Amino acid sequence: MIDLKITVTTDDGETGTYPVTPKVQVEFERHHKVGIGKAFSQDLKMEHVYWLGWCASKYAGKQPKPFDTWLDSVTDVDIIDESSVPLDETA
């Protein structure tokens, strides 16, 4: 299972972190016609990263503008791989 979150920052300073849910993953694969694992390990395109942020924010209830218009306001997108986050040893 892919355990990702994506943080989107817009030009007005707003930042949001959204889960990359199974629904987002499947929509990515249907839209781009490539498996998400392959897309991010063998042929990374920035469009894929931004589209993932747009789609994740959409399913998180943000109701973003259409993708190309949304891009005009985005300043940064960061992928957070939760599966590589070390366990808290104090817990």
Image (cartoon, helix red, strand yellow):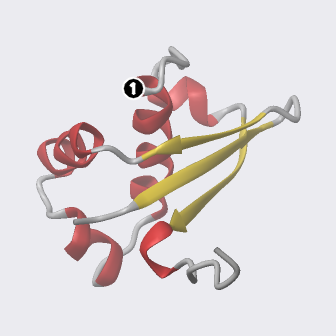
Q: Residue at x 29, y 65 (%)?
A: 2
Residue at 30% over, 78% down = 43
Element type at mark 1 = helix
Question: Residue visible at 22% across and 37% down?
Answer: 23
Above or below residue 68? Residue 22 is below
Q: Is residue 19 left or right of residue 71?
A: left
Question: Considering only vertical position in the picture, is 11 above or below 50?
Answer: above
* In the image: residue 12, left or right of residue 85: right
Placement of the N terminus among the 4 image quadrants: bottom left
Residue 41: where, in percent of width, then height?
32, 82
Tag 1: amino acid: Tyr
| Image position of 39 (left or right of 78) | left
Query: Which of 61 and 87 lies nearest the eye of the viewer?
Result: 87
- Residue 60 percent coordinates (x, y): 47, 26
Q: Residues within 10 Å of mark 1 (few under 14, many from 20)?
A: some
Q: Residue at x 32, y 44 (%)?
A: 21
Residue sitting farthest toward the front: 91
> Within the image, what quadrant is residue 34 found in?
bottom left
User: Closer to the camera, 69 or 34?
Assistant: 34
Callout count: 1
Expressed as whole percent of the image width and height from the top left, the position of residue 91 reads 64, 74
Q: Establish if 86 lies above or below 26.
A: below
Q: Nearer the viewer, residue 87 or 62?
A: 87
Q: Looking at the image, which residue sits at the far right?
A: 13
Determine which residue is flagged by label 1.
59
Look at the picture and state if 1 lies above or below 24.
Answer: below
